[in-house]
Amino acid sequence: MAAAPPRALPALLVAILVPPALSQVNPTQKVLQLLTDLHAKVIKEGEAAHQTYVEFSAWCDDRSKNLKYEVKTAKAQVEELKAAIEQASSSSVSLAAEIEETSGKIATNEADLKAAAEIRKTEEADFATAEKDLVEVVGALERAIAVLEREARKGGAAMLQVQHAGSLLQALQVMISAAMVGSQDATTLTALVQSVQRDEDESDALGAPDAAAYTSRSSSIIETLENLLDKAKDELETARKKELNSKHSFEMLKQSLTDELRFGNEDLAAAKKNIALQKEAKANAEGDLEMTQKQLVEDEQTMGTLKQDCMMKAQDYEAETKSRGEEIKALLEAKKVLSDMAGGAADVTYSFGQTSFVQLKSSSRSTTWTSVDLANFEAVRLVRNLAKKEHSDALALLARRMASAMRYSTAQGDDPFAKVKGLIKDMIETLLKDADADATHKAYCDKELGETATKKAEKGAEIDKLSTKIDSMTANSAKLKEEVADLQKALADLASSQAELTKLRQSEKAEFEANKPEMESGLEGVKMALKVLREYYNKEGKAHSAAGGAGGGIIGLLEVVESDFAQNLAEMSAAEATSQADYERETKENEIEKATKESSVKYKTKEYKQLDASVAEASSDREGVQTELTAILDYNKHLLQICTAKAETYEERKARREAEIAGLKEALKILDSQAVLLQRRSTGRRLGRGLRGGATLAADA
């Protein structure tokens, strides 16, 4: 902000340039009054500027504090998000390795299952072929044996040939020739006998006896076939058992591999889901990190800009205060000088009546105006009309100063154009500076209002987010506290129940410990009584006739009592042992339940305390954000006060200034058109015309 320009000299000149004939007030007194008023105005403006600066300085402090807090919070969030990203990346790598390992196991199990299925398929085919062959052999042997038995009963010639055959193969050929067997059975039995013959040949090569020949000599052909039948049935049964075992083994292997595949696929799906969640968490954290870092950079830049703006404002305020002090000093000094030194001169000057030297001169001037006079008058009239059109006090004052300058410059023989042109150029420069300042102010307002609106929306959203988070954590904390209260009540009930159980057990134990010695003593007494009575009544050679019958009754009764006492003691001991075992079991269960509930209380208490701490922290954060929002709203209100257009908009002010500047430039053109002519005139003639023109202008003004 530029220092305020001194206003004492313009006001003083305005007062001096007004001719005595135009005012009934002593000009010196008028100047002193103006100086006094201006002094009071400058002091008032200084006080207002000080109040504005104090408010701005307080806002700078609050805004700086809030920005520092935002930067600190953002840096902490950046570190947390980086840690979360690193954790998600590490988890993703571990899960990827797990997926690769699980996929390898699944592929291996699938290959093993496929290979086992192929092997099983081959085994089934081999078994089907073998079973078919063995079934055919069994059937052929059974039918051949049946035919031989039937032929043996008939006693035909064919049967005799069979019985006298030298070998099983020869016997079979006889049966085939005699049509005892069908062609299919003949083929099957021939193949069987040839197979047996090959086995026997191999046995002969190893030195074993000829089983077929031996069989042929030592037993009938039927027995030989029955032996072959038994062997075929055994082989069929063995093959079927082997097939059943192979099938069962395959089913077990298949079930095992299928379970491993199912578990592997479940683990693979879970790992893929987890890695997707980790990637999503990483992506979210990276997005949040980018936004947080961006916000951090913006906050740091804003903090730097704020610091610079606040320092510039302080420097401007110091410069303005210094300039205002110098202005006040100048006003006081001017007032003192006028009061001390110009009082007598004012009395002498303004005590001769109301007719001035200029009026005397104007009474004798010629009524013919020169082109210079007309130009001077035209320039003043143009500025005056422009002031009326634009309602500008500054232009009206300029018109009066132009008239005074032309009048007194002409009267004193000076060049009126230079003074008037200087006044117009100064006014143009002032208007241009005001326009630049106004444009700068508008840009500042647009920038600050835009940033404030953005910040206000961001803080509002942040408050809503924190409020939602606080409500959720508060509800969870209340739920946990309710659960802890229920658990504590359950623990109290459990402790009360355990105390009652212990009290009851102690009572039962005390009763048992009191009754057991009594029972043992009573049982011992009964046993001793029985011993005495038995010894007496069983003794030989009694000296008197003993009451044996009555004694036997007593002994019998005591034996019943002994049995009752022993049974009661055993039942008491068993009941005590059972009660003690039940008590220990119930106590153990209560201890487990107590430990479980106490652990739940511990962890739930810890959790709701953490939630309460988080709620407090979030509430503090929300209060901090609310404080920031309040500061933003206050600053926005301040901006609206200084930036909102009141009676005249920026566009209207701009148009008015442009019109004023254009009018002043037109006045300069009018004056410039007569500058050369004025320079050619003689000093005497210029002086005369200037006096006449000045008087006319003064009268017109």
Image: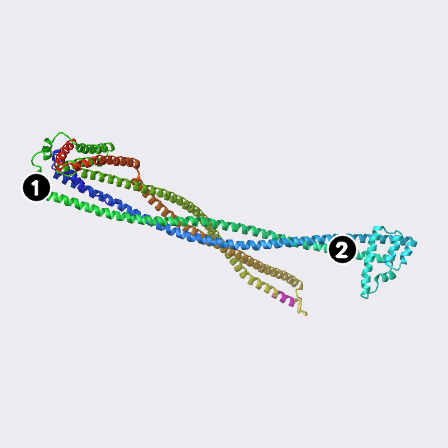
Whichever of callouts 2 and 1 sits on the residue coming sooner in the sequence is 2
Q: Residue furthest right?
A: 157
The answer to whether residue 355 is left or right of residue 142 is left
The answer to whether residue 350 is left or right of residue 60 is left
Q: Nearer the viewer, mark 2 or mark 1?
A: 1
Most foreground residue, 680 or 657: 680
Most foreground residue, 586 or 294: 294
Chief secondary structure of the magenta span?
helix
In the image, residue 577 lies at what x, y percent? 57, 59
Above or below, 205 against 614 in this view is: below
The answer to whether residue 256 is left or right of residue 429 is right
Most foreground residue, 101 or 386: 386
Judging by the rendered image, the residue that carries numbered circle 1 is 344
The residue drawn where x is 56% and y is 50% is 269
Question: 10 Å neighbourhood of mark 2: few (<14), some, or many (≥20)?
Answer: some
State how far apart marks 2 and 1 are (Cα): 157 Å
509 magenta-colored: no
Q: Please, what is the three-letter code of the amino acid marked with disc 2?
A: Glu
Location of the C terminus by quadrant is top left
Judging by the rendered image, the residue that carries numbered circle 2 is 237
What is the magenta range? 528-535
- Asked whether the viewer can see residue 454, the reply is yes
Question: 10 Å neighbourhood of mark 1: few (<14), some, or many (≥20)?
Answer: few
State the SS at label 2: helix
529 magenta-colored: yes
In the image, residue 660 lies at what x, y percent? 25, 35
The answer to whether residue 661 is left or right of residue 559 is left
Q: Please, what is the three-letter code of the amino acid marked with disc 1?
A: Gly
State the SS at label 1: helix
In the image, residue 257 lies at what x, y percent? 63, 54
Q: Residue furthest top?
A: 367
The residue drawn where x is 26% and y is 41% is 433
